[in-house]
Amino acid sequence: MAYHRIHIRQALGFRESTEQDIDALTAWLSLEMLPHEHRPDHLHEAVYAHCQVTQLEQPAAKRVERLVRSALRSYEDQVQQRVLPA
């Protein structure tokens, strides 16, 4: 199966995601999406659309779920720290 995925990526001009790509997706969510959108299903769709535009192979659904939950949690913590400083 991995053999076919390699050829499909090559044919479509996509590349496999790396840990750096996942970190960049998390940063993109935090900077570009979370200030305006907090609904997880919309954030999932945004991640998939962003991967399409950047020609990055989409992470597995569970990975996207974790990425969105983590980004949401981090963003909410940052907002809370600004609103209620220690």
Image (cartoon, helix red, strand yellow):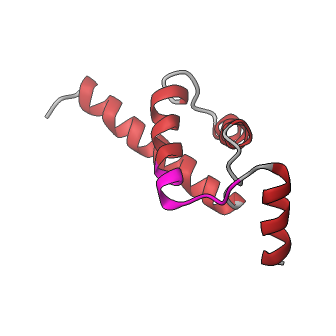
Residue appearing at x 79%, y 58% in the figure? 10
Quick one: 32 or 24, which is closer to the camera?
Answer: 24
Q: Is residue 36 above or below residue 64?
A: above
The answer to if 20 sits in the magenta stretch is yes
Q: Is residue 85 left or right of residue 51?
A: left
Front position in the image: 50 or 43: 50
* Residue lying at 39% horizontally and 43% vertically, measured from the top left: 74
Front residue (pair 33, 50): 50
Q: Is residue 18 above or below residue 69?
A: below
Q: Residue at x 77, y 49 (%)?
A: 13
Residue 61 is situated, as x and y percent measured from the top left of the image, at 71, 58
Q: How many marks?
A: 0
**Residue at left offset 68%, top offset 43%:** 51
Q: Position of residue 3 (x, y in %)?
A: 81, 76
Is residue 1 toward the left or the right of residue 44 in the image?
right
Q: Name the one closer to the observer, 73 or 48.
A: 48
Chain part drawn in magenta: 15-23
* 21 magenta-colored: yes
Q: Quadrant of the C terminus?
A: top left
Q: Quadrant of the N terminus?
A: bottom right
Q: Position of residue 66 (x, y in %)?
A: 56, 57
Seen as rendered, the residue at the extreme left is: 86
| Rendering coords of residue 35 (x, y %) | 48, 23
On screen, residue 84 above or below 68: above
